[in-house]
Image (cartoon, coloured by chain):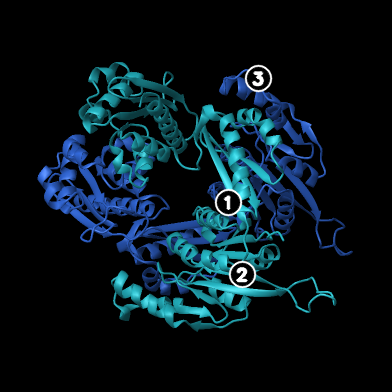
Chain colours: A blue, B cyan
Amino acid sequence: MSTQRINASIITIGDELLIGQTIDTNSAFIAQELNKIGVWVKRRVAVGDIYDDIWRSLDEESKHADIIIITGGLGPTADDITKPLLSKYFHGNLVISQPVLEHIKYLFEKVYHRPVAGMLERNLKQAEVPDVCIVLHNERGTAPGMWFEKPLESEMISSSDTQNEKKTVDKVFISMPGVPHEMQGLMINEVIPRLQQKFRLPVIIHRTAFTFGMGESMIAERIKDFESALPSHVKLAYLPGYGLVKLRLTTVSDDKEKAEEEMNRLFMKLKELVNDVLVSDRDEGLEITIGKILKARGKTVSTAESCTGGFIAHLITTVPGSSLWFKGSVVSYANEAKEKVLDVRHETLANDGAVSKETVTEMVDGVLQLMNTDFALATSGIMGPDGGSDEKPVGTVWIAAGTRKKKEFLKLNLRFDRKRNIEQTALSALNFLRKFILDNG
Amino acid sequence: MSTQRINASIITIGDELLIGQTIDTNSAFIAQELNKIGVWVKRRVAVGDIYDDIWRSLDEESKHADIIIITGGLGPTADDITKPLLSKYFHGNLVISQPVLEHIKYLFEKVYHRPVAGMLERNLKQAEVPDVCIVLHNERGTAPGMWFEKPLESEMISSSDTQNEKKTVDKVFISMPGVPHEMQGLMINEVIPRLQQKFRLPVIIHRTAFTFGMGESMIAERIKDFESALPSHVKLAYLPGYGLVKLRLTTVSDDKEKAEEEMNRLFMKLKELVNDVLVSDRDEGLEITIGKILKARGKTVSTAESCTGGFIAHLITTVPGSSLWFKGSVVSYANEAKEKVLDVRHETLANDGAVSKETVTEMVDGVLQLMNTDFALATSGIMGPDGGSDEKPVGTVWIAAGTRKKKEFLKLNLRFDRKRNIEQTALSALNFLRKFILDNG
């Protein structure tokens, strides 16, 4: 018998999500983790701290999903109403949980280094849980997770000639605090293992090809025969981003081995079709791909950043172990810094300007000398909203990648807002560096 | 008569939102813009590229909202099914829109610099729109926005002694492409002005106090009398983040002047209560606050970053006009760079280590000298997952803020993952710099 598809809904609670003050990163994390174990996220809903709206969303989502995951609304302050609501929804009463209380005391004393005697009533109140739930241990914070099961009698009544058993379907409701770090710990340590135990889950396989420099329509045109020949159980999605397009193949199956074999074959074909713009066959950032190439070759890189203001160095240093191949960066935001730190000549800045091929050339030479690396990357541009001229409007960018012996250049004409101009420049520069290293490494 | 509250629901479409591959930033932007003009966002829903799920969400959301905003599902590739669905939902037919077709041709020729003759059928198909919608001009891309109105007869039938008119309530459905940059242009240029014309909207006022360094429970305890004395039409929300808590007061009113007066009075009181931990009375980043202080005093700053890897410089340079008060940064990721670029002594690194009070002191001196600024900020720490020792475990961080004459220090012991350790260090360092400048400026 085929495994049944298990559907989940994610409900996030908090007014801050509805006035746009907070970007919801929790849902993405939860969806990723569920997806890995073969749970299909069907919907995500965000509602405010309003009793009726939360109640309604529990009713609605449980109609179509087997697993309902709720985050937010569990903090120690007065705008949190979720816990009493859940207690009522599942016909329970709030009672003190001794293990939770001990844990809160432990955190106060040993982690926050505050006297237990100084604990506030509202901290103690966090040890209250509905007596109808399984308490999930939150090792990273004071608000526990909660696991509820709601047995619903199946609508199919067994006919008299079959066995006289009633099939009950349990819906699972899981509530977690909204602080990302705490929620993440709960998901990994408590929720995922319990879901795997509770449900018989299929295998979901994704394969993502990361391309850079070709538009969505052009790619679609090129792979249209491949796409129309895909078997119906394999889905292809286009995920466009800043200059990049991710192509994702997805399948759901009960037979892991067979599905992987099929997906490998299809993915190989897809990669061949986009080979000239393919950056990576994993869903990973350019900085990770570059790190792998440099590590394999035992080479190092440094950056000299004007308009990107350290963003490239930041992307690189989010990669664990990047100290093996990245030595540092000079963010030469002022011209003075370009001259004094990177030895860009005063005449170059005066004659060609800070945003010029000549300046980024000297920036590369300067940082290669200073950081003593094999490769260097330099950026200089006008990110806006001010600072543009007729000759060099906002969005003009010069990028250089090079070694002591050789340099290559890329000029961009961007037309976005400041933040996106910075991001787009950083990604284009990293992809340019990647190609330079591959060609000259 | 009091203005009626106008509710909105946001529906975002795309499988990538449900497997966690993409973080939904569109909803936050849309919610912010709606909120500014007095539209209340009641719910946000994300669904996959599945016909029935999209249809169901249109039905459900329109039951409770006056305005339904839909993004995503309009791209040129085969996984987009929204446009035909909307056409059917509103009983229309897809027809070519000449203005949209002209615009697509214009973009190809003048912006993408590609021959019009090379346009693909799928690009031309983007000029198709349902004949029952108002087309919204998307100046930033090829997929147009669409505005549908669905007149619903009011359930209140007018009694015979009143005027014999039937009140009809129009629900508005607006569909926009999911590319953030394009959606943002459409919201600002088309959607917001049309909504303001269509609905009579109340005033929503928020006031946000940005605090740093005190926990949510402690703040709640301190302001509990204030909170319980708030009038029922004013709401207080706690928005905790990395080391910070934002306190937000919200009111909805028809009388802007009266409401602003009341909110100013309440907000003044709130600020007094948290004065010692107050960073800003606006919902803005620390880097913006620091920029204002430095600009007002005509002073400059530079950074020397090891463990934050350029993230502080990045935060600073996202602020337009930051070149007035920020000169640059040295990201001295390798010890070699600390010595060679920042003149940190070899003995200091050998005896005290890279993560030490001594090293950050010399980093401050080095970058002050190099960048010639009034203030400097330095960070050095172990962000993980590797690199820790018994003496200096992962999460150990030293921060120094200083001038040539004086330095102050902050030591952190963090216990998060790499990415959050970097973010937390950067925010703590910026707040430490802010206080140092205020005390020593």
| Residue at (60, 50) in percent of width and height | B257
Residue B106 spot, x, y in % from top left? 34, 76
Residue B408 spot, x, y in % from top left? 37, 21
Q: Few, some or many C-alpha atoms within 10 Å of disc 3 (few <14, some 14-19, many ≥20)?
A: few
Q: Nearer the viewer, mark 3 or mark 1?
A: 1
Q: Secondary structure at mark 3?
A: helix
Residue occupied by mark 2: B172
Q: Secondary structure at mark 1?
A: loop
Measure the alpha-carbon separation of dots 2 and 1. 20 Å
In this view, the residue in front, B432 or A158, is B432
Q: Are marks 3 and 1 in contact (CB under 8 Å)?
A: no
Query: Quadrant where the C terminus of chain B lies?
Result: top left
Q: Nearer the viewer, mark 2 or mark 3?
A: 2
A131 above or below A35? Answer: above
In this view, the residue in front, B62 or A57, is B62
Q: Are marks 2 and 3 in contact (CB under 8 Å)?
A: no
Q: Amino acid at mark 3?
A: Gly
Question: Which chain does tag 2 point to?
Answer: B
Corner quadrant of residue B359? top left
Mark 2 vs mark 1: tell me if same chain: no
Measure the alpha-carbon separation of dots 3 and 1. 35 Å
* Numbered badge on residue A118: 3
